[in-house]
Image: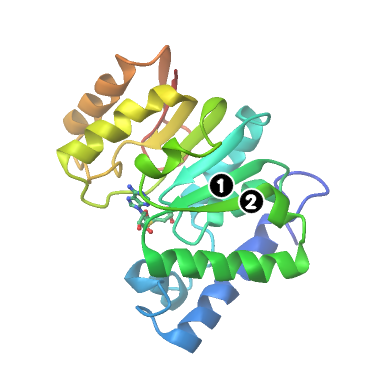
């Protein structure tokens, strides 16, 4: 059975298979490192996890339900799975990525999708560069923009983390995973410190414990 997130839109199972098969093709053609998949995405293929992870589907469902009239940017988008799902379910989206080969793989994914779904060219854009500076001179700021952070536990230093949080005031809202924001926070005290640090600057803030099992999502409005 093909499951849809929204009736009449591109189904989640279809996209799971499509993204998985594109990853597999990139791996066959170029290998894990040259393709930009590296261990993170190569493992999805070898472990048969498919193209879309559970937390990505859960977050997509949440965003479609609660952020339906907003423009969405995923920071650290990797191959762009999340903005692709959202764009093919009616939202206007972008993915920001700073790793050159990853971005090339994301571009290949977008091109392959556009062959089947030409509308994706209008509603899904890739942005080359590092957050936050790469977003500053784009149209992807303003009160109608929601930033998503899923897994960017990439070892940011304190300066980048500070600038990342300062930048939130340029958009209307941020949904982020507290454990994997910039650096990995395994214990609850560290996650709660991050939540409070952002919440003091936000107009409102909430934990989203039911969004996805084992994840630590929170939502902040600015
Ligand atoms: C572990 S991958 C996760 C990809 C996808 N979001 C997911 O959850 O499956 C994290 C990605 O974020 C990118 N990234 C980390 N920090 C970034 C930054 N400051 N600006 C842009 N991209 C960043 C990395 O290059 C990497 O491709």
Q: Is residue 160 left or right of residue 80?
A: left
User: Which residue is disc 1 drawn over?
Assistant: 94
Question: Viewed as shown, does residue 21 lie left or right of 198?
Answer: right
**Residue in view at x 49 percent, y 62 percent:** 79
Q: Is residue 186 above or below residue 117?
A: above
Above or below: residue 53 compared with residue 7: below
The answer to which quarter of the image holds residue 197 is top left
The residue shown at (23%, 40%) is 160
Question: Residue, x 52% and y 41% (percent of image)?
Answer: 73
Q: Position of residue 148 (x, y in %)?
A: 46, 39
Tell me the number on the disc at residue 124.
Answer: 2
Q: Are marks 1 and 2 in contact (CB under 8 Å)?
A: yes
Query: Can I make out residue 49 in this image?
Result: no
Q: Residues within 10 Å of mark 1 (few under 14, many from 20)?
A: many
Q: Quadrant of residue 32?
A: bottom left
- Secondary element at tag 1: strand
Quadrant where the N terminus sits is bottom right
Q: Nearer the viewer, residue 155 or 132?
A: 132
Q: Residue 61 is drawn in which quadrant?
A: top right
């Amino acid at each position: 059975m093909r499951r849809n997130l929204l009736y009449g839109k591109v189904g989640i199972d279809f996209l799971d298979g499509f993204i998985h098969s594109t990853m597999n093709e990139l791996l066959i053609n170029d290998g894990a490192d040259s393709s930009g998949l590296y261990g993170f995405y190569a493992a999805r293929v070898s472990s048969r996890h498919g193209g879309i992870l559970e937390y990505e589907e859960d977050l997509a469902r949440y965003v479609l339900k609660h952020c339906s009239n907003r423009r969405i940017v995923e920071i650290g988008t990797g191959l762009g799975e999340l903005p692709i799902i959202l764009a093919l379910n009616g939202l206007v989206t972008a993915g920001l990525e700073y790793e050159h080969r990853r971005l090339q793989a994301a571009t290949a994914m977008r091109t392959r999708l556009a062959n089947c779904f030409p509308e994706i060219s209008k509603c899904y854009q890739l942005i080359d560069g590092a957050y936050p500076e790469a977003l500053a001179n784009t149209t992807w700021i303003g009160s109608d923009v929601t930033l998503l952070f899923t897994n960017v536990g990439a070892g940011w230093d304190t300066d980048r983390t500070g600038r990342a949080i300062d930048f939130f005031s340029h958009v209307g809202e941020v949904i982020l995973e507290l454990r994997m924001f910039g650096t990995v926070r395994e214990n609850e005290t560290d996650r709660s410190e991050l939540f409070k640090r952002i919440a003091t600057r936000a107009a409102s803030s909430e934990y989203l414990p039911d969004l996805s099992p084992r994840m630590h999502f929170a939502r902040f409005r600015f």
